[in-house]
Amino acid sequence: MATSTTTAPAAPGGSGERRRGSLLHRLDIKGAPYAFVAPFFIVFAAFSFYPLLYTSWLSLHHVELATLDVQEWVAFDNYVELWGDERFWNALRNTFTIGVLSTVPQLLMALGIAHLLNYKMRASLFFRVASLVPYATSVGAAALVFTMLFERDFGMINWALGTIGVDPVSWESEKWPAQIAISTMVIWRWTGYNALLYLAAMQAIPAERYEAASLDGASRWKQFLHVTVPGIRSTIVFTIVLSTIGATQLFGEPLIFGQGPNGVTGGANNQYQTLGLLLYEEGWKNYQMGRAATVAWAMLLLLVVLFVVQRLIGRLRSRRS
């Protein structure tokens, strides 16, 4: 008796569906990471990379603010003129001196505050939160308050100096008093922020190192110098880099200290004009957007040079050690 066997017909398109499923699986595995990081690169390209390219293009042209569509090609003439402009060198010197006056005390104070907060103390959480209050305060509001404090005739600073027999200081019209006043604003704003960065790095140092140093008879001061500071060296370098960038881009404090955008930017004699204020003056007071873009690129190149020098110094130190 003959038997017949029948096989079920293959599902239509079964192999094709499997291939499509396998393809989608591979795309999911390989393409998902790019999809996750794509929003960052899109935003970066739109708000950072494109403005950078556009600014570099403007720096090679003579362009006025009122007629941005009318651009006259001048190649590197703007850079040559900037190199020979005394205002640029004056702004560069002021940026450097204000940066030193604000960065060095700021980081030293932040290191000391972080060292104190690293010990067990009452209300430590309160002091940590309080150290962030200046950072969370508006730059404009803080600068206005400090401007009133440093006012020559009615300011509290001169009143306090008068109680000990010191004559009133013209904080706004003299070079070094003005730069000290602006540096004070920067120190007040950023010291607490850097202190918390140092505190987080200190708390990551193993307690065994302090115990070993204590057993060896090291005082707290020696523990700070030989255990704490080497343990947070990378964080210190990071804060120095951040402070350098902030000093180069300093704008809000000196602008408001000079009585706002309608006043003279950087003082009557440009005694505290920074590179940021020079950029503002060229672009929004003189309406020369090409020269303003040139100043912006000079600031960027300056930062690149500083970072290269910092890396070279770091490599030399690592080789010696």
Image: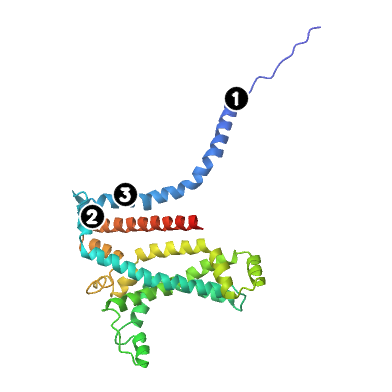
Q: Which residue is mark 3?
A: 53
Tag 1 secondary structure: helix
Q: How far apart in space, not on screen, are marks 1 and 3 (Cα)?
A: 50 Å
Confirm whether residue 159 shows in the render: yes
Tag 2 secondary structure: helix
24 and 261: which is toward the camera: 261
Quarter of the image where one finds residue 144: bottom left
Left or right for 22, reference 187: right
Q: Residues within 10 Å of mark 3 (few under 14, many from 20)?
A: few
Identify the disc placed on residue 15: 1
Image: 152 above or below 76 = below
The percent coordinates of residue 118 (x first, y second) are 58, 72
Do residues under tags 2 and 3 come within 8 Å of each other at their CB atoms?
Answer: no
Q: Earlier in the sequence, mark 2 or mark 3?
A: 3
* Of marks 2 and 3, the one in the foreground: 2
Q: Residue furthest top?
A: 1
* Of marks 1 and 3, the one in the foreground: 3
* Of marks 1 and 2, the one in the foreground: 2
Tag 3 secondary structure: helix
Q: Amino acid at mark 2?
A: Tyr
Confirm whether residue 67 shows in the render: no
240 and 224: which is toward the camera: 224
Q: Residue, x 53% and y 72% (percent of image)?
A: 114
Q: How far apart in space, not on screen, are marks 2 and 3 (Cα)?
A: 16 Å
Image: 50 above or below 273 = above
Q: Residue furthest front?
A: 320
Q: Which residue is mark 2?
A: 79
Q: Earlier in the sequence, mark 1 or mark 3?
A: 1
Q: Residue, x 46% and y 46% (percent of image)?
A: 38
Q: How far apart in space, not on screen, are marks 1 and 2 (Cα)?
A: 65 Å
Q: Residues within 10 Å of mark 1 (few under 14, many from 20)?
A: few
The percent coordinates of residue 209 (x first, y second) are 63, 66
